[in-house]
Image (cartoon, grey):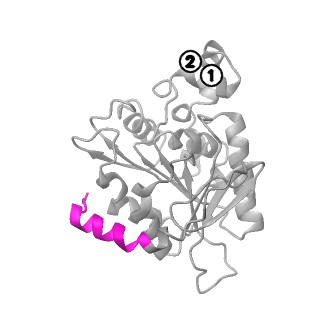
Amino acid sequence: MTRLSLSSFLSFARSLSLSLSLLPSVVTSAAAEKIPPLPGETFSVSGRPAFLIAAPAGPTPTAPRPWVWYAPTLEKYPGKEELWLISQLLTAGISIAGIDVGESFGSPAGRALFTALHTELTRTRGYSNKPLLLGRSRGGLMLLAWAAEHPEKVGAFAGIYPVVNLTSYPGLDQAAPAYALTAAELAAQLTAHNPVDRLASLAAAHIPLFAIHGDRDTLVPIDANSALLKSRYTALGGDMKLIIAEGQGHNLWPGFFENPALLAFLIAHARP
């Protein structure tokens, strides 16, 4: 695992300043309120704001185009922390897209909106039926909850300190309203919704998983999330690589976002 020096990171940020100045201005419509971290398209899917940062078409433009599906697509995400990774993916010919489903915590309503985005990208815009899922923090909860129901539509999953366990974060009391359930009702139905309890379909489909997680993360503890995910997934015969960031918590350490192994994993699985 490598970490850019401060001077290198600042130099990279300066090189992006011109591109960032081209970002569209903020608009008030709910359908186009999302501003990508690099110039891209904003549009509406099922009444929710979505974005697409498209890589240049490759030498065979008629082939399905590879893309990374990022979550959570909220006001601040993806953010400047992902600029290096997004730029590297674009250079490799891989586009990035996402949809704002609010604080869905992987609920059925959020999963339905995710299906709508997948349909839009694959049937209307010519993108691959098997995107790479990239979940940052609670984005892991959203993406893996959807993936468990659609393993045939997943190329791979990668997470940056991903949440995969509702009981760990945000907790059932906080998550229950997104499911239109009480906490007790959600607890009774937990195995039908909790990603870490729904891995069998992904393992059967041989979906590769990857995560990088700090061993001092107190907000999203590694033992109840990425480490538990790896333990259960490998027990099912699945393949998962886990990188433990020693001494790191739930923070903005560049090593989480500028990780060569994460980039290599995404590029390797971009064209299933």
Q: Amino acid at mark 1?
A: Ala
The dot on residue 1 is none
- Neighbour tally class for label 2: few under 14, some 14-19, many 20 plus, Cα within 10 Å: some
The image quadrant that residue 271 belongs to is bottom right
Question: In screen coordinates, is 168 left or right of 132?
Answer: left
Residue located 60% across and 71% down the image: 54
Residue located 62% across and 30% down the image: 193
Nearer to me, 76 or 183: 76
Tell me which segment is drawn in magenta: 1-17
Residue located 69% across and 55% down the image: 32
Question: In screen coordinates, is 238 left or right of 111?
Answer: left
Question: Is the C-beta separation of discs 1 and 2 under 8 Å?
Answer: yes
Which quadrant, please, contains the C terminus?
bottom right
The dot on residue 176 is 1
Percent of width and height locating residue 183: 61, 16
Residue 9 is a magenta residue: yes
Nearer to me, 76 or 266: 76
Percent of width and height locating residue 110: 68, 39
Q: CA distance from mark 1 to mark 2?
A: 6 Å
**Label 1 residue SS:** helix
Q: Which residue is mark 2?
A: 173
| Residue 184 drawn above or below residue 96 | above
Nearer to me, 67 or 28: 28
- Neighbour tally class for label 1: few under 14, some 14-19, many 20 plus, Cα within 10 Å: many
**Label 2 residue SS:** helix
Q: Amino acid at mark 2?
A: Asp
Percent of width and height locating residue 261: 34, 60
